[in-house]
Amino acid sequence: MNLTTVAAVIAMLGWAASGIIVKSITDIGPLAIVFWRMWMYTVLVIGFLYLRGTPLTRKGIRFSFAGGAALGVDLLLFYAAVHYTTIANATVITACLPILMMLLAGPVFGEAVKLRDWLVAGIAVLGVAAVAYGSSGMPQWSPTGDLLSLGALVAWALYFIFSKLSQEHIASTEYTAGSALIATLVATPVAVFSGQVFVMPSVDAWVWLIVLALGPGVASHMLMNWSIRGLSAALSSTLTLAIPIAATLMAWVFLGEKIVISQAIGICVVVASLSYLVLTTNLTSSTPAKNLESSQSP
């Protein structure tokens, strides 16, 4: 295993751990977690651009606005989702981005989708249903959490679309900083209105918030953006599809969330189906993957 693959795997594990960290912070609400995490993350990313001598510009903010708004909604919904449902459900549902993108591929990007791909997508949906069925009745599960995860998936798909559309106008690093700033500004009034930000985090919570900002936030994105240059699009995209498996195992080890047989089978079906879709798309597409920031929530 070469260095770029190691970096990509570490980035993937960081993203997989994000839901575990969020669910472990119990003394403040999920909206407060988004508030504090995003402000720290935004300051770090914008500061990094200034140190590089490529500060965030008005143009960057303009072309990052739509994507940043979608990202802010995605984070609010996903962080709330992991508090109301199992890590397995939240991560498996949000991992179904390729399926949702198939629905949007024609009208947005003019891409034709084969009948074979629709059949595989249907199998993946059945896998998601198996995961949801296996979680029903568990104390960590609720239908509200699954619905929040579904909303996060829609918001994430919109972020992905706006990310691709911005590539011809600004660099990916400036888009990352601009979208982070807009996402933070979108999330802030929601968090303030909820009243959750008025409960100050404990020392332990501050430690985990910093880890969340530096680890799954800054480090994972930088490692993946660096490693993507040395990896094939197929391999790098498929690696991110292992996030539901890694997150579910982490939740079992660190949070005590049970994994029943139907969940395990459902997760394998989803990952296998999505891997097929991603691999066949990347191997037949003439456009190389430029940036993997849009494959997983920061």
Image: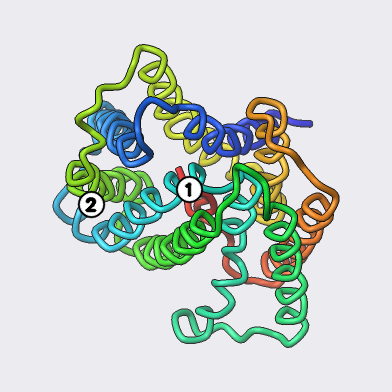
Left or right of 193? Residue 262 is right
Q: Amino acid at mark 1?
A: Ser
Residue type of the residue flagged with mark 2: Val
Q: Residue at x 48, y 42 (%)?
A: 83
Query: Looking at the picture, how far across and down is residue 73, in whole percent?
Result: 34, 56
100 is higher (above) or lower (below) than 17: below
Q: Position of residue 5 (x, y in %)?
A: 70, 36
Residue 191: which numbered mark, if any?
none
Q: Residue at 21% x, 39% y: name it.
A: 195
Label total for image: 2
In percent of width and height, residue 223 lies at: 54, 33
Q: Residues within 10 Å of mark 2 (few under 14, many from 20)?
A: some
Taking the spot 71% from the left edge, 85% from the top edge, the residue there is 114
Give SS at disc 1: loop
Image quadrant for the C terminus?
top left
Tag 2's secondary structure? helix
Q: Which residue is mark 2?
A: 186
Position of residue 101 relative to residue 151, above or below, is: below
Classify residue 210 as left or right of residue 144. Answer: left
Specify whether 119 is left or right of 214.
right
Image spot of residue 277 (x, y percent): 72, 68
Numbered mark located on residue 297 in the image? 1
Q: Earlier in the sequence, mark 1 or mark 2?
A: 2
Tell me if label 1 and label 2 are in contact, CB under 8 Å: no
